[in-house]
Image: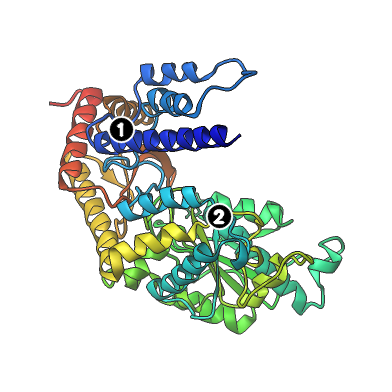
Amino acid sequence: METKKLTNKKLSLQAFSRAAQYAEEYISGVRERRVGPSPSDLDALENLNSTLLCEGVNAQQVISDLHRYASPATVASTGGRFFGLVVGGSTPAAMGASVLNAAWDQVAVLEESAPSAIYLERIAADWLLQLLGLPKKSSVGFTTGSSMANMVCLAAARNYQYAKLDIDLVRTGLAGAPPLRIIVSEESHVTVHKALSILGIGTGQLVKARCDRQGRVRIDCFPKMDESTIVCLQAGNVNSGHFDPFSEIIPKAREAGAWVHIDGAFGLWASASPLKAYLTEGVELADSWAVDGHKWLNTPYDCGVAICKDAEAVYRVMTTQAPYLQEGGGRPPKDMVPEFSRRARGVEVWAAIQEMGTDGVAELIERCCSYARQLAQGLLDMGYELLNEVVLNQVVATIGSEDELHRIVRAVQEGGVCWFGTTVWQGKTALRLSVSSWATNDEDIILSLESIRRATREVLDME
Ligand SMILES: *Cc1c(COP(=O)(O)O)cnc(C)c1O
């Protein structure tokens, strides 16, 4: 028995050091390799599709197979030239913290089950509120991303607004309750719609606020708000990177008794930069905010943050009680997010912020914005039409016909130098670049522009 245990321990250490060695190999090669995998890398994934085994293989073999076949078929999003979706890299300390976090394998439900992890999450929460300039006593819940953060905040908003109508949703449920007035922007992110739908608020129930050409809601025709209204505004449109006019709408919303929720997945980070903070002016007057760790703060996947000024409003929706849950001081994570068993995502947030400091975070935001401007200028020089005013890290541009544009983007992706996709903005098919990674440097911008120039010439047959 004793020997078996020892052997197991040794095996697990060997698997771990092998994983560390492969991870190091992967990271050190990530800037040199293709950004998107090649077709043969994708074909090789088949090697991982064995029949379901009766007897498993040893851990080292499992790790070797993963590295051999799965590592090449990743997208190199931790390098500096992945500009698709809105995808951050992973800072060195945050990535390292995530390895330690895996070794600890804490279940971060209560302080008793994960003392250091929850301690770190509390500090990270406090730092986040300072960096983003949000009210001190807000509840901060670490979620899987902004989708879930939107859902947490909107659940609190919904129950709070119903409580004013003397309806306790936790007790009576939605059945028979009169509809609330839900105002979203025409440009609200799809995950806001999903969150509302999960919460029993269908698309047919939504009042849409009209937007201008940059995707900001217009104040001249903003819908009427009342006591039972929830308003969903946006910090950072997923295409244009623009912000709703918070200072003009939120005070009016408050006066009317409406709850204002901000989807600030990546854009809310503008608050952490003295140069960009003008974009989020007035955002601190809202009631709740969703923001990502895994996009612009560059923590590993997955990590989002649900922030709510009235902490009690979140606790009332999320709390669970059972005789076996001994609770220390302060509210435990299980009362701030939907999950019960959960990993302590705040550990990587703590590590990233500790590594960068406030200056480092500001610099990260500003550097990405300045690279976005360089990319936009480069595209203009190639004859592209810029479809957004580049105020943040997002660039939307178009050239040629729809088919030609798709061919250009495909040629860039196949070239492997950089990676981004297409979108439709203001009725036009366009390419969309998002600069969100700490790892992007001057050379990455030059190489990427060269690759776009080559593909554009190839497809448009220009001299
Ligand atoms: C990415 C994004 C979301 C969703 O966030 P996830 O972290 O992917 O769940 C919501 N809103 C906006 C504006 C986004 O960019």
Whole-percent x, y for residue 459 in the image: 25, 24
Check residue 463 in the rendering and tell me which mark sits there, or answer none.
none
Indicate the amino acid at tag 2: Gln
Image check: 348 left or right of 405? right
Q: Quadrant of the N terminus?
A: top right
Circle 2 Cα neighbour tier, 10 Å, few/some/many (<14 / 14–19 / ≥20): some
Whole-percent x, y for residue 366 in the image: 25, 62
- Residue 293 can be seen in this image: yes
- Residue 418 can be seen in this image: no
Nearest to N terminus: mark 2 or mark 1: 1
Indicate the amino acid at tag 1: Val
Check residue 35 in the rendering and tell me which mark sits there, or answer none.
1
Q: Quadrant of the C terminus?
A: top left
Q: Nearer the viewer, residue 129 or 285?
A: 129
**Up/down of 84 relative to 37, above or below:** below
Image check: 288 left or right of 167? left
Read off the residue under disc 2.
106
Q: Tell us which disc is closer to us: 2 or 1.
A: 2
**Up/down of 388 relative to 335, above or below:** above
